[in-house]
Amino acid sequence: MKNSINRSLTMIRPLVRTKENLNYFLILTSFMLLLACSAPKVAEQQKAKALPANFDAKNKKTADSLEAFIPLKTDTYFKDPKLKKLLDKAVAQNPDYLIMQERIAIANSHLKVAKLALLPSFDIQADLSGTRYGKYTMDGVGNFDTNLSQNITDKQRIATDVTPNLFLAGKVSWEADIWGKLSNRKKAARQRYFASKEGMRLLQTKLLTDIAELYYKLVALDKQAIIYKKNLVTQQHALDIISAQRSVGKATELAVQQFNAQNNNILAEADQLYLSIDQTEKALLNLLGEYGGTIERSTDFLSGHLEVLNQKISVDSIIHNRPDVSEAYFELSATNADAKAARAAFFPSLNLGAYGGLNSFSFSTFFEPKSLAWQMLGGLSAPIFNKGQIKQEFFIANKKQQITFLQYQNTITIAYNELSALLHRTEAFQNVLAHKSKEIEHLEIAVNVSNDLYLSGSANYLEIISAQKNKLQAELDFVEIQLKNADSQVLLYKALGGGIN
């Protein structure tokens, strides 16, 4: 009877200890969860201010009557075939653009790493060691004593001179994404990948607009060089008239010297113009990634396709199609995910693991079934004494989100005002060019009339110089306005978000 009671007590004690351990575990887990509940909240993601329904405040169209914006096509927006060739070459050769492509690949790798963090990891571990234990150590005495035991076989006897340890196993470990820490990190990486792609589109748009601006500047400089050449011919003709008049006593040496001075002034300005042509060509070659050569270009401005100006397009769809706005939006989403991941660090993390393989202290028994070894692991950890650091990391992540929102809102504001100004500027230049063209027509007549009046004695040489100078300046100004008009169309291409190839 007494023996029966002892056996019963022996069976109950482990159960009691197990129950006590379970209670301790539940108490500890509850304590960790209570600590985690003190985690601060992520700042609510703000929304950008609503955009006006139209760029023209006088126009009272409603958003329902407007169409969604269809992205431009680079090949159809620019009419000049020689410019199109330069744009294609720049995309293929520009060093900054090629560097950006490599950064896109890096961002894609970061995204893949973040995705793989959600999956279990599997490793193969192989260890081989040999240890000689001292006779006066616990391991040395233990091995010696084990070998004297009658309960082991010959295969279980331990080599005491050098004790090998052979281990070969596969290990699996996995962190359970209970609170969304890993999934938010993946989301942040994905949003930054999208942002980098928009950054690449922004860089491409800037590259193409820079090339177009330099190209049109070359066209303008070429046109101005032709104007100087024609004006020199006109000036020389006037000088011949004045020289002939001086030879017969009808003009003075002062008049001749004034015309010679005017001619040299034009020659000096023409030389500076040729220097500008060379420098502009070199700047364009830098963007193309070429050492030298010449830039093939047209003799006149071929404006872009501006049918987009006649469309009733939704302001919101235009602005959010721009790569700078899209990039800022994706970065805002990424920082929001960063803040959520930082908050998840306040909560307990659950790590699971296991290994299975072979473990033995002798080569002869290593591959025997009895050498099979395995282990299952589980761990729950929560921050307690390092919460100050976690709080600061969360504070930084939260503030970065708010900063990114302000940057996003600022990008939208700049985009709207920039595009609004360009639309008005493009319309205004059409009227300016029409007035300047009429001015040149009148000044051409004035030059001819001044020559005739001088020959008839009704005008002096200063009126000829003034008329020719005014005509030259008007022609140069007309080209400058043509260049500004072309630049406006290039900037409009950029402000509309660039194009797709």
Image (cartoon, rainbow, N blue to C red):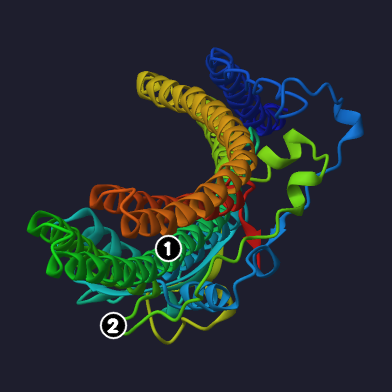
Q: Position of residue 484 (x, y in %)?
A: 48, 49
Q: Position of residue 80 (x, y in %)?
A: 60, 72
Q: Is residue 339 left or right of residue 226?
A: right
Q: Residue at (42%, 67%) from the top-left corner?
A: 223
Q: Residue at (55%, 31%) from the top-left corner?
A: 408
Q: Is residue 395 left or right of residue 231?
A: right
* Up/down of 213 relative to 292, above or below: above
* Up/down of 17 relative to 297, above or below: above
Q: Is residue 437 left or right of residue 148?
A: right
Question: Disc 2 marks which residue?
Answer: 292
Dot 2: element:
loop
Q: Amino acid at mark 1?
A: Ala
Q: Is residue 174 visible?
A: no
Question: Disc 1 marks which residue?
Answer: 220
Q: Amino acid at mark 2?
A: Gly
Q: Is residue 370 visible?
A: yes
Q: Quadrant of residue 1?
A: top right
Q: Quadrant of residue 130?
A: bottom left
Mark 2–mark 1 distance (CA, rounded to whole Å): 21 Å
Dot 1: element:
helix
Along the viewing direction, whichever of 49 and 370 lies nearer the viewer? 49
**Position of the C terminus by quadrant:** bottom right
